[in-house]
Image (tube, grey):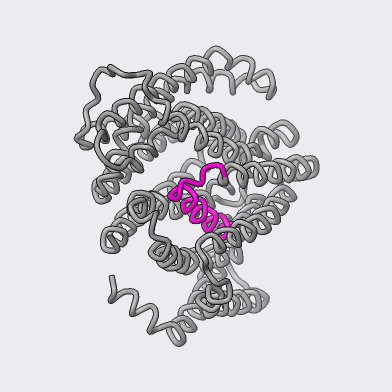
Amino acid sequence: MKTNMFSGVLFIGGSQSIRVVLNLATIAVLARFVTSEEFGLIAVLTTISLIANYFGEFGLSVSIIRHQGRGLKRVANLVFWWTLIFSSVIGLGLYLTSGLVGDVLKNDELTKIISIAALLYPIVAMRSAHKAFVERMLRFKLIAVIEVSGAVVSAVVATVLAVNGAGVWALLAQQYALSIFLAVAYFTFSGFRPSWPRDLLNVKELFSFGGQLTAYQLTSIVGNYSDRPIILRFQGAESLGYYSVGNQLIQFLVMHISSAVQRVMLPSMSSMRDDLGHMREAYCRVFYAVCLVMLPSMVGLSLVSEEFVLLFLGEDWKRTGEIVKWNALAGPFLAVNWLNYTILLILGRIRTQLIFGLVQATATIAAFLIGSAYSIELVVKLYFAVIFVFSIALYIFISKMLSIETMAQIKNIFILLLSVTAMTFSVLMLSRWVDGSTLFRFVCLVGVGGGVFMAIEFIFERRKLLGLIRAK
């Protein structure tokens, strides 16, 4: 099981890393050909799509991964058909109400985008059951190949269209290309073929679990993505464009890495959910690994956010630097939250998930509303404060549930915290003295900060790091 988990993290994490690089490179290119207003419109569409997709899936695909005993193909078949039905209805509903959405958000272009994007929902639904089937079989290498290939294809499509002046439609075409490719690939290689459903109404147990999970997912999406329509309404499409690009940069890094861990943990640890000792051991190992990756990378990115944005996006996107700075600081806490919510999902504590999700959603929406009344910079600062406080509360709850000693966990990451602190101090001090081009400053700050971090880790944590490598 440990070998499967580790190899799964390698494959999924590796593929996610490649996708992060591809997505960042694509954004860097598209930022030269697509306006901030057009990025803002796609950001609103993304929020609507996420909510619609969760309604369409209704949390049913997780039932395939968690299923124990016989009847797996029957469950997968029911999940396939109900997901397709729900998503088709939602796609039709969005098409019919696209004009109303455009009127509410006072943007006619958004009406056209939503109506054309409506067909995406049944396409995405057609891969849901097949993807869950592959994940349950722990075929992580296949998943990595499929998703990297899809990222390459969609990036090429978007880039070619953007260079030829397609504007916002290049971004929409990217979503279509990715969805179609993944649907065909998972259907082809999953080994699962849906049959005509004979007991389509015999789904009480699936809907009971899926309904609670969907309720949590929707509260999470509403809480985390309601910023798009709120900012569009109060600050306008241009400000939303700067904000959404800054958000995307962090989401690609945080969510791809976090989802890689979640996608491996969910099928791998579902079989040990009755063994608290193994769950606790696995959680502590993964917690340390997440902190080891996320703390130095996100804090480091926050420290050089201005130079990073100028190099990556250009002078016209300078305002995005402040967005990246604060969202990067929130990154490690978001990653730990993903881990903690995954533990609750594995243990079947969906109601607890929902309660935490409602509290977090309420607080984040309040932060978005208050912040957007003044500036997008205040939005990200208030969001960071909410995530910081909430992540501590959720971690305390998980620690008590798994009987984890807080001091032992702090001791486990003490050297890591020391390394990050030393890195931060060295970068802040050096930034006062280094002049020259943006590239020169960026290279110097990253080199010195990374060198300090690696040196302290190698001196004090060499045995732990080498032991982890040998053990795997």
Quarter holding the C terminus is: bottom left
Residue 331 placed where, x, y %?
56, 57
- Is 146 left, or right, of 382 in this rendering? left
Identify the residue shown where x is 29% and y is 74%. 471
- Is 371 left, or right, of 426 in this rendering? right
Identify the residue shown where x is 70% and y is 56%. 385
Identify the residue shown where x is 66% and y is 39%. 227
Q: Nearer the viewer, residue 69 or 46?
A: 69
Q: Nearer the viewer, residue 85 or 429?
A: 85
The answer to whether residue 306 shows anywhere in this view is: no
Magenta region, mostly helix, strand or loop? helix
Image quarter for residue 203? top left
Identify the residue shown where x is 39% and y is 55%. 274
Image quarter for residue 128? top left
Q: Nearer the viewer, residue 98 or 23?
A: 98
Above or below: residue 191 compared with residue 407 = above
Numbered range of the magenta stretch: 330-351
Total marks in image: 0
Q: Nearer the viewer, residue 65 or 158?
A: 65
Residue 185 placed where, x, y %?
25, 35
Residue 323 placed where, x, y %?
64, 52
Magenta-colored stretch includes residue 342: yes
Image quarter for residue 406? bottom right
The answer to whether residue 159 shows anywhere in this view is: yes
Above or below: residue 59 compared with residue 135 = above
Quarter holding the N terminus is: bottom left
Q: Residue furthest top?
A: 96
